[in-house]
Image (tube, rainbow, N blue to C red):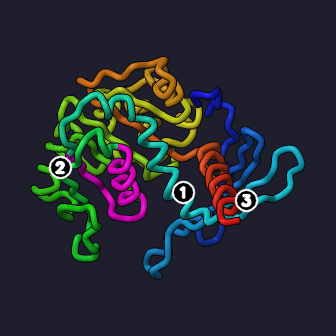
Amino acid sequence: MIAGLDPAQDSARGIVPLSQGQFLIMPAEAAGHAGVKVATVAPNNPSLDLPRIQALYLIFDARTLTPEAVLDGTALTTLRTPAVSIAGIFPVLIQRSTPLRLAVFGAGQQGVGHVDTITDVMDGRRDIESVTYIVRNPDRVSLPQAADEVVQLGSPAATSAVAAADVIVCATSASEPLFDSSLLRTDAIVVAVGSHEPHVREVDAALCGRAQVVVEDIQTALRESGDIILAIAEETLSADELIPMKDVATGAVHLDPNRPVLFKSSGMSWEDLVIARAVVQASRNMNVAAR
């Protein structure tokens, strides 16, 4: 984005209904490459001990459209989603140096991935004081390596963790708000990545009205992000208050560290391409070094 990539120019996600879920088709072109992610969303898969979302990624040379690589799209998504989240909140995240307390809704790949990414990016900048995972069924969750505790959604321990947190990550398949936003500190940062559908949300409308709301792209958020769409419908937020991520990354907008920040991501095609291109280049560099 600093080099000129504009998320507003990205291709819209294609959603194709299937008998047991959806195809998500996500094409993009940038910086000499083109790519497409084909993901499946199968809501019943968790009951079969299978992932709800699975994917493959194809990357091509943009000039000749020659295929260059096939990547594990699920692994790619697990890497890129927290990378995008942290890029969206990075300037405000580093304005303080006190140790971070994290509250994470969901202990799946995305919840754990966000903790790993925050830990890596904050290394040498801010220590991680505590990590609390908040889930519906703690007994079914093995304690992630970086966790201090796993607590039940709606419990007093969950309420305490949210109230104390510097950063709250929402990485679930929930369709209703996960917590009461009146609990939040005035300087809390909330990241919501769990949904890309207009009728579901992880945070309440009151938070959208109170926070500085950063989105990957305004039109994408108005089309796909239920957290945003429903808050606008409930008249706690207006579209002209939304802050594009590009403006935060380039410094065109400076977030107030004394007000809550909400970063709402629904996932965009350009993000997969940027990461896939970096993976392909790293692979080439490793092969050259091996020779």
- Residue at the disc numbered 2: 129
Could you tell me if residue 47 is visible in this image? Answer: yes
Badge 2 marks a residue whose secondary structure is strand
- Mark 1: give few (<14), some (14-19) or many (20+) Cα within 10 Å: many
Q: Is residue 110 magenta?
A: yes
Which part of the image, by quadrant, shows the C terminus?
bottom right
Magenta segment's dominant SS is helix
Q: Is residue 209 magenta?
A: no
Q: Quadrant of residue 69?
A: bottom right
Q: Nearer the viewer, residue 271 or 22?
A: 271
Q: Amino acid at mark 3?
A: Leu
Q: Amino acid at mark 1?
A: Thr
Which label was assigned to residue 45? none
- Residue at the disc numbered 1: 77
Which label was assigned to residue 58? 3
- Please report the bounds of the magenta region as a residue range: 101-121
Task: Give the alpha-carbon distance from disc 1 to disc 2, as whole Å.
Answer: 27 Å
* Of the two numbered discs 3 and 2 in the rendering, the one whose residue sits closer to the viewer: 2
Compared across the picture, whether 151 is left or right of 280 comes to left
Residue at left offset 18%, top offset 36%? 98
Q: Nearer the viewer, residue 250 or 126?
A: 126
